[in-house]
């Protein structure tokens, strides 16, 4: 039996169609005559076709898809000249940025083999990533600044499934991963669109409470962690559905269990330990331990992948500072599944987390009207990267610190207080 026929038996076609529908109706809320740009692994072709169908049913103007192929990626590392690793397709990203400037929506389908580059030269991987990040910046800014409606969903690529479930036959691994994706994305329910409306309302309640408290900082305490994260001046909490600058309300991440905001890039102090491994560009970085002074990471260790971690931190000045802090209860469905997905979209929704690098401009009061200089003045960070890693567990407590120094419990043993 070939791979394509295995996938057809392993992935429930009804749930896959529901995922495509949710991506268009909930994730993007695509508008009539709006163009859509999709990026996806080649293995995700069945999902791309369904998304394209639902996009056109919703009145899309033009749907354009760019595919990535794992074998072609590996061919570069095997045969390309050394200078190749300092190059990226800037022309492509400039075109994407132009499409977004002209009103196109963005959908990314995740599903790449998270360990694809594990055996490649880390220096070449780092160079290629940096070149790509620099070239991608014009398009990424349209996304991170929420100029447009955008969404990320996932497809159970067999190579990813075998990383998550290494002891299972491929078809069974794909089935297990597919079912986990469907459950986390709420498409295993009778009415996923209604379920997302209720979930978004619950996340909005959490965000509203935090916004009402106006904490100046959060304090994380637990095993290997005593971290105070100052919050940016005029920060605003968000969770679930968000309204982009084009006026369209979208769910950027499917799944999502977080409420998040912008830390102050200069006001993070103390030390913190990761509670789950970080899968980054084919390397598993485990047991991360970092120390902050005046917002900057001055010491970083990891029991595994430390060299890659330090290369990430050296990407640019902003890579050693925080761009996001997010709160997720330990009892979230993704945490309760007990699965390590080796995929940040899922793993970040199993635990409270922080992100190195670029902040989101929308996480400020009146963020849509702020210039980059104003965002920086209020404590927002700027970087070529945005990498989330997990610091929450059922052993971590979080307190909100008010401007007068008084404290209020936010989470106890990983649950909302």
Image (cartoon, rainbow, N blue to C red):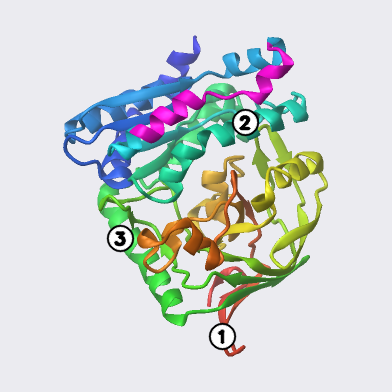
Identify which residue, 298 or 378, lies in the foreground: 378
- Kindly check if marks 2 and 3 are in contact, taking CB atoms under 8 A apart as contact: no
Q: Is residue 186 above or below residue 121?
A: below
Identify which residue, 362 or 19, lies in the foreground: 362
Q: What element carries label 3?
A: helix
The residue indicated by pointer 2 is 131
Q: In this view, does 307 lie above or below 210?
A: above
Label 2 or label 3, whichever comes before in sequence order:
2
Outermost residue toward the front in this view: 373
List x then y, in percent, for residue 370.
Answer: 41, 62
What span is in magenta? Answer: 80-98
Identify which residue, 293 or 343, lies in the foreground: 293
- Kindly check if marks 2 and 1 are in contact, taking CB atoms under 8 A apart as contact: no
The residue indicated by pointer 1 is 403
Q: Quadrant of residue 84?
A: top right
Q: What element carries label 2?
A: helix
Identify which residue, 334 or 75, lies in the foreground: 75
Tell me, yes or no, whether the highlighted magenta stretch contains residue 93: yes
Residue 19 seen anywhere in this rendered image of the structure = no
Label 2 or label 1, whichever comes before in sequence order:
2
Residue 174 seen anywhere in this rendered image of the structure = yes
**Distance (Cα) linking label 2 and label 3:** 41 Å
List x then y, in percent, for residue 52.
Answer: 28, 27
Within-10-Å neighbours for mark 2: few <14, some 14–19, many 20+: some
The residue indicated by pointer 3 is 198
Q: Is residue 80 above or below residue 253?
A: above
Residue sitting at x 56%, y 54%: 350
**Distance (Cα) linking label 1 and label 3:** 33 Å
Residue sitting at x 66%, y 57%: 321
């Amino acid at each position: 039996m070939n791979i394509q026929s295995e996938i057809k038996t392993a992935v429930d076609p009804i749930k896959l169609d529901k995922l495509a529908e949710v991506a268009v109706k909930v994730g993007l809320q695509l508008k009539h005559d709006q163009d859509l740009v999709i990026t996806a692994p080649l293995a995700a072709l069945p999902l791309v076709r369904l998304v394209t169908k639902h996009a056109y049913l919703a009145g899309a103007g033009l749907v354009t898809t760019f595919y990535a192929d794992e074998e072609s990626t590996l061919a570069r590392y095997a045969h390309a000249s050394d200078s190749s690793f300092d190059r990226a397709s800037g022309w492509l990203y400039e075109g994407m940025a132009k499409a977004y400037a002209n009103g196109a929506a963005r959908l990314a389908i995740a599903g790449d083999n998270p360990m694809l580059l594990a055996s490649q030269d880390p220096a070449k991987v780092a160079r290629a990533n940096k070149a790509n990040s620099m070239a991608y910046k014009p398009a990424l800014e349209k996304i991170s600044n929420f100029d447009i409606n955008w969404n990320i969903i996932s497809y159970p690529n067999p190579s990813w499934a075998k990383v998550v479930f290494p002891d299972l036959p491929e078809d069974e691994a794909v089935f297990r991963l597919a079912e986990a994706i469907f459950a986390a994305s709420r498409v295993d329910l009778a009415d996923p669109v209604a379920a997302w409306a209720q979930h978004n309302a619950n996340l909005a309640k959490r965000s509203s409470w935090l916004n009402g408290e106006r904490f100046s900082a959060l304090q994380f305490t637990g095993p290997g962690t005593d971290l105070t994260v100052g919050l940016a001046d005029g920060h605003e909490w968000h969770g679930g559905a968000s309204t982009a600058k084009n006026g369209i309300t979208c769910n950027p991440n499917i799944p999502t269990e977080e409420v998040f905001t912008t830390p102050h890039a200069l006001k993070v102090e103390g030390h913190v330990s990761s509670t789950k491994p970080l899968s980054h560009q084919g390397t598993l970085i485990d047991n991360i331990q970092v120390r902050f002074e005046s917002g900057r990471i001055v010491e970083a260790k990891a029991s595994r992948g430390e060299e890659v971690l330090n290369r990430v931190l050296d990407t640019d000045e902003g890579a050693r500072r925080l761009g996001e802090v997010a709160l997720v209860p330990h009892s979230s469905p993704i945490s309760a599944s007990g699965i390590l997905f080796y995929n940040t979209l899922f793993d970040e929704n199993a635990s409270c987390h922080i992100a190195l690098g670029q902040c989101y401009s929308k996480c400020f009061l009146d963020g849509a009207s702020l210039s980059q200089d104003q965002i920086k003045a209020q404590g927002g960070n700027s970087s070529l990267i945005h990498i989330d890693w997990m610091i929450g567990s059922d052993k971590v407590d979080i307190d909100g610190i008010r401007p007068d120094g008084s404290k209020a419990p936010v989470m106890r043993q990983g649950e909302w207080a």
